[in-house]
Image (cartoon, rainbow, N blue to C red):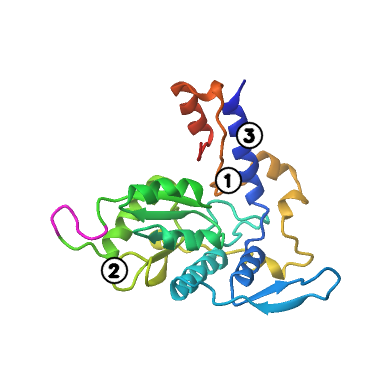
Amino acid sequence: SFPDSAVSTMASIVSDSELGVDYSLQYEFIRLWNSSLGKSSGPIGSPVRWVTRGPISQENPAAETICSAASKCAIQLSEDTDGDGVISSEEGSLVIVVTADGSAANRISKYRPTGTILVVSDSDTVIRGTNSWFGQQGLKVDSLDEDSAGNTVGESEILSTALIHAKQMGLAVPGKKILFVHGVHSVSADEQAMFRVAVSDNTKIESQVRNPMLIENYIASIRTTTINRKMLAVPAENIRSTKVVCTMGPSCWSEDMIGKLLDAGLNIA
């Protein structure tokens, strides 16, 4: 009888669970199974063997490689600056990707980078689609080709617009690493992609822990095994990347309840 409370609880669970993910190991796993090598167990009882699975992407291997590299870079630039064992929302990277059809953003989402993926597009379909892809948030612009005055839109204009929006949404705090993924011959990264790295407000943050894998007795989710009073009193903040899908029954059909579900974290109905 309280569907909005159920959605809110689900959103809180997945948001906190994301803090315990080892994104570096997860990236390597996804990358391996999407690369030219894959593991096949063969018939039951046979030894594990490695077989060729074909190129990384039949459609656009170059763009796939660049987008996967951007995801890996976002993971490596995310640093546990306070040493609590998790990457909170302020410590993760921000990826800004320009896309006309959504394919570039979806390639990045596939490799599960830390932080938010801000998808800049002039397509309503692409912006709506961000609700179903890991880590994506949409930013609708009027055009990726020309501005209101008829001038050609460049990467700098798109980045400026995206940064203003990111700061307003709390996605680009001072010192946050930002990856800007755009095209080579056009602003869209769908066909030919490249990326560059910047720091929000050019503020430098010194890290206390640069590589958690070098910590003695390192574990993937230190937060769930090393609990102290401070961690309970001041929990780490996380901008949820996992999407919440709801099957709506009669009790959810009113406009008022739909609004409550959206406020609670509903992404797909």
Q: Nearer the viewer, residue 135 or 165?
A: 135
- The residue located at (57%, 33%) in the rendering is 247
- In front: label 3 or label 1: 3
Q: Amino acid at mark 3?
A: Thr
Residue 30: quadrant of the picture: bottom right
Badge 1 crowding class, 10 Å Cα cut-off, few under 14, some 14 to 19, many 20 or more, is: some
Q: Amino acid at mark 2?
A: Ser
In the image, residue 56 above or below residue 143 = below
**Where is residue 266 shown, x and y percent of the image?**
52, 36
**Where is residue 32 shown, x and y percent of the image?**
63, 72
- The residue located at (53%, 24%) in the rendering is 252
* Distance Cα–Cα, label 3 vs label 2: 42 Å
Badge 3 crowding class, 10 Å Cα cut-off, few under 14, some 14 to 19, many 20 or more, is: some
The residue that mark 3 highlights is 9
Q: Amino acid at mark 1?
A: Glu
Q: Would you say 13 lies left or right of 260 here?
A: right
- Element carrying mark 1: loop
The residue that mark 2 highlights is 186
* Distance Cα–Cα, label 3 vs label 1: 16 Å
* Upstream in sequence: badge 3 or badge 1: 3
- The residue located at (75%, 61%) in the rendering is 219
Q: Would you say residue 230 sits in the magenta stretch?
A: no
**Disc assigned to residue 37:** none
**Where is residue 104 shown, x and y percent of the image?**
43, 63
- The residue located at (44%, 23%) in the rendering is 255
Disc 3 + disc 1, Cβ < 8 Å: no
Q: Would you say 138 lies left or right of 229 here?
A: left
* Distance Cα–Cα, label 2 vs label 1: 36 Å
Magenta region: 144-150
- In front: label 3 or label 2: 2
**Disc assigned to residue 237:** 1
